[in-house]
Amino acid sequence: MPAKELNKSCMECKDAEFELTVRKRQLCSLCFKRFIAHKVQSRLSVYRAFGLDGPKTQLLLPVSFGVSSSVLLHILNTDRQHRLDNGRPLGYDFKILVIEPSTVAATGNPFDQNYDALEKNFPMHTISRIPFHSIFNYVPEMEEIMREYAGSRFIDDSTRSNEERLAAFRASISTPTSRTDVDTVLLTRLIVEFAKKSGCESVIWGDSDSRLAAKALAGVAKGRGASLTWQVSDGMSPWGVRFEYPLRDLYKAELLQYESVCAELSDIVIPDQPPSDNVLTKNLSIDELMLRYVQNQGAKYPGVMANVARTANKLNPSTSDNAPTCALCAGLVGNVKGNSGVTVANQAEDNHSSQFCYGCMRSRPEELC
Ligand SMILES: [Zn+2]
Ligand SMILES: [Zn+2]
């Protein structure tokens, strides 16, 4: 009997029965959570102050109710509570931002209960809830950028509500890849402006290693190689707010494991829709296709996918301050020195012209042929 019991015990604390296997180690749920949390905390160690009275950096955590951002929230909250209980310096604190999922995707899922559970389980934090179309309030120049970007396929009617105007703009973009692509750009701009207005120095994104690898591959396929730096690597974004990806050492499957042993998250997380066989591949965006590919292949060859994200994190942002940047996504307009990107002549009578990067041009409603 003792030998049998030994086989079942956690390899770390040897005290409890093991519940999960992670990276070939059999751990109890407590040791497992500690292992995962350590991977996150070491990524955020730059924000730790040296003394209790040190300045506290404010970070912004966008929560989408997906498993990754919810797990990240749980890890950061547990660490914060632990530090407060032990009188240790926080170093940083964070605010939570929810962009109403129903205004981003028409999934038909009401999420009020998830939001209520979020407020109930994490009462120590400032949680803000804003709709996607508040981009017109947070990024006032977006109105003009959208008009110029979309060209004649989109007629903006300023008498309509912001919600209708954003819907009309998104509807003018024809392919799923382009729609997802432009949505990502718009959501990033909205989150960044919210961070700035609420005094946050950094945005902490809940992208797992798997998603970062998928983003790196999809970014190249979509002609967005030039803006990959801040989409996948830690550092300064073009808008004066830092981007951090503290889940970069963790696979999506490990985050799902974490969620499974976290009762507090069960009412918060909206599970991923299982991939439907009815959806034709051509109706999937490149981003979705890549994510599926990385998740499938990552299960077989985790090291390879980890290497994609790790290599992408070594990309250095351009050091040139005067290089022309895209009005929509702030990517460099020229991919290489001397290449001036694409100039879009507006169809309007004022003959005004503006510049968007190659990646944005490819997603534009009216393609140049
Ligand atoms: Zn243990
Ligand atoms: Zn762009």
Image (spheres, rainbow, N blue to C red):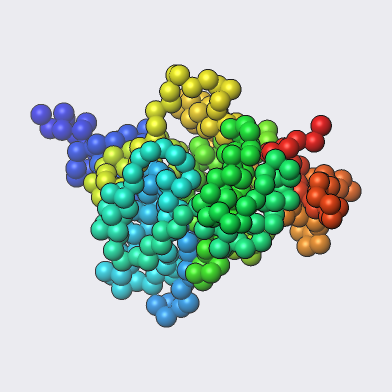
Q: In the picture provided, is 82 more to the left or to the right than 64?
A: left
Q: Residue 216 versus residue 45: which sits nearer the camera?
A: 216
Q: Position of residue 25 (x, y in %)?
A: 34, 36
Q: Where is residue 358 in the image (x, y as percent from the top left)?
A: 76, 42
Q: Where is residue 296 in the image (x, y as percent from the top left)?
A: 48, 25
Q: Can residue 331 be seen?
A: no
| In the image, farthest residue toward the bottom | 53
Q: Residue 105 versus residue 288: which sits nearer the camera?
A: 105
| In the image, farthest residue toward the left | 1
| In the image, farthest residue toward the front | 159
Q: In the picture provided, is 96 more to the left or to the right than 283?
A: left
User: Which quadrant holds residue 364?
Assistant: top right
**Tally of numbered tags:** 0
Q: 364 above or below 44?
A: above
User: Which quadrant holds residue 77?
Assistant: bottom left
Picture residue at 80% right of the left edge, 53% below the top:
354
Picture residue at 43% right of the left edge, 23% below the top:
276
Picture residue at 78% right of the left edge, 62% below the top:
321
Picture residue at 58% right of the left edge, 22% below the top:
282
Q: Position of residue 92 (x, y in %)?
A: 44, 68
Q: In the picture provided, is 192 more to the left or to the right than 316?
A: left
Point out the image quarter for the N terminus.
Answer: top left
Q: Can residue 106 be seen?
A: yes
Q: 225 above or below 369?
A: below
Q: In the picture provided, is 309 more to the left or to the right than 77?
A: right
Q: Residue 226 versus residue 302: which sits nearer the camera?
A: 226
Q: Residue 204 versus residue 136: which sits nearer the camera?
A: 136
